[in-house]
């Protein structure tokens, strides 16, 4: 992907790296950690994020091979650049024991099937619903935010054994979730490319 990096972003990364040594992270993990920190100006994400380099490598390959990207809310989709996303929240209907966000996830799964990358940055109930499906995801970026259900849903994601990017705290949100996906999207697919 040929991407022109704005000088402000270059300077932002220079300052980030001056304040935090990320050189010990494997390449894709480093890319995700740095882009999430960059999106939130929050260095604490370096110790808060949880991911596995092998899972990121497989997800990176799936993403660049054209796997669908599903988001829980339009705001996450708006933050993902240069890639179409699927969001069915507008079509979701709340019911007994089911939030509109959760129903949107069901509808999205019916549309895309297995093998998608799922990016959840808003609703813990969306992440909880995804975990009940046999979605066989390429990756779940589970970074919902909030004081109710966010920590628990992310813990359940880690316990599920699915390939994932999550974090331990209540922090999260649309900007950091889309940043994690963008890190994989922007990362080179060959040694000749520059990040």
Image (tube, rainbow, N blue to C red):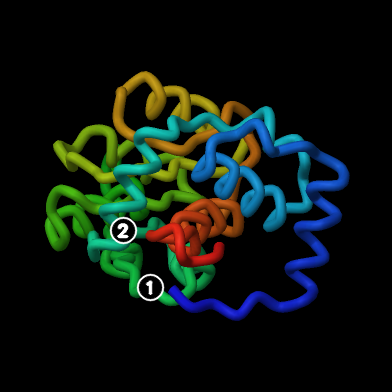
**Residue at left 53%, top 68%?**
79
**Picture coordinates of residue 7 (x, y %)?**
77, 76
Q: Is residue 148 visible?
A: no
Q: Is residue 96 left or right of residue 113?
A: right
Q: CA distance from mark 2 to mark 1?
A: 10 Å
Figure quadrant of the N terminus: bottom left
Q: Position of residue 41 (x, y in %)?
A: 78, 52
- Residue that protrudes farthest toward the front in the picture: 192
Query: Dot 2, how many residues are within 10 Å of its Cα: few (below 14), some (14-19), or many (20+)?
Result: many
Check disc 1: other Cα within 10 Å, few if <14, some if 14-19, many if 20+: some
- Depth check, front residue: 1 or 95: 1
**Residue at 34% of width from left, 54% of height from top?**
100
Q: Which mark is residue 63?
A: 2
Mark count:
2
Q: Identify the residue shown where x is 71% and y is 55%.
A: 38
In the rendered image, the vertical position of residue 143 relative to residue 174, given as above or below: above
The foreground one among 75 and 92 is 75
Quarter of the image where one finds residue 108: bottom left
Residue 28: x and y, percent? Answer: 50, 45
Q: Nearer the viewer, residue 54 or 118?
A: 54
Any part of residue 181 in sight: yes
Whether residue 161 is situated above or below residue 7 in the rendered picture: above
- State the SS at label 1: loop
Q: Which mark is residue 60?
A: none
Q: Identify the mark at residue 83; answer none if there is no mark.
A: 1
Residue nearest the viewer, comparing 158 with 109 = 158
171 with respect to 85 (left or right): right
- For image coordinates 34% across by 63% down, the residue present is 89
Which circle's residue, 2 or 1, is located before the other in the chain? 2
Question: Which image quadrant is residue 72 in?
Answer: bottom left
Left or right: residue 107 compared with residue 61: left
Callout 2 touching callout 1 (CB < 8 Å): yes
């Amino acid at each position: 992907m040929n991407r022109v990096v704005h000088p402000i972003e270059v300077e932002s990364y220079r300052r980030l790296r001056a304040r935090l040594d990320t050189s010990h992270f494997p390449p894709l993990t480093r890319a995700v950690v740095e882009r999430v920190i960059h999106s939130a100006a929050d260095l604490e994400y370096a110790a808060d994020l949880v991911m596995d380099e092998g899972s990121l490598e497989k997800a990176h390959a799936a993403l660049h091979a054209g796997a669908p990207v599903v988001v829980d809310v339009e705001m996450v989709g708006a933050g993902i650049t240069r890639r179409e996303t699927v969001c069915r929240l507008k079509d979701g209907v709340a019911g007994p024991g089911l939030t509109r966000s959760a129903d949107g996830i069901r509808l999205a799964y019916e549309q895309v099937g297995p093998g998608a990358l799922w990016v959840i940055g808003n609703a813990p109930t969306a992440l909880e619903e995804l975990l009940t499906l046999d979605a066989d995801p390429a990756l779940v970026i589970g970074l919902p935010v909030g004081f109710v259900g966010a920590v628990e849903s992310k813990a359940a994601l880690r316990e599920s054994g699915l390939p994932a990017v999550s974090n331990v705290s209540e922090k999260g949100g649309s900007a950091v979730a889309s940043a994690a996906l963008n890190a994989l999207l922007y990362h080179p697919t060959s040694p000749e490319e520059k990040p």
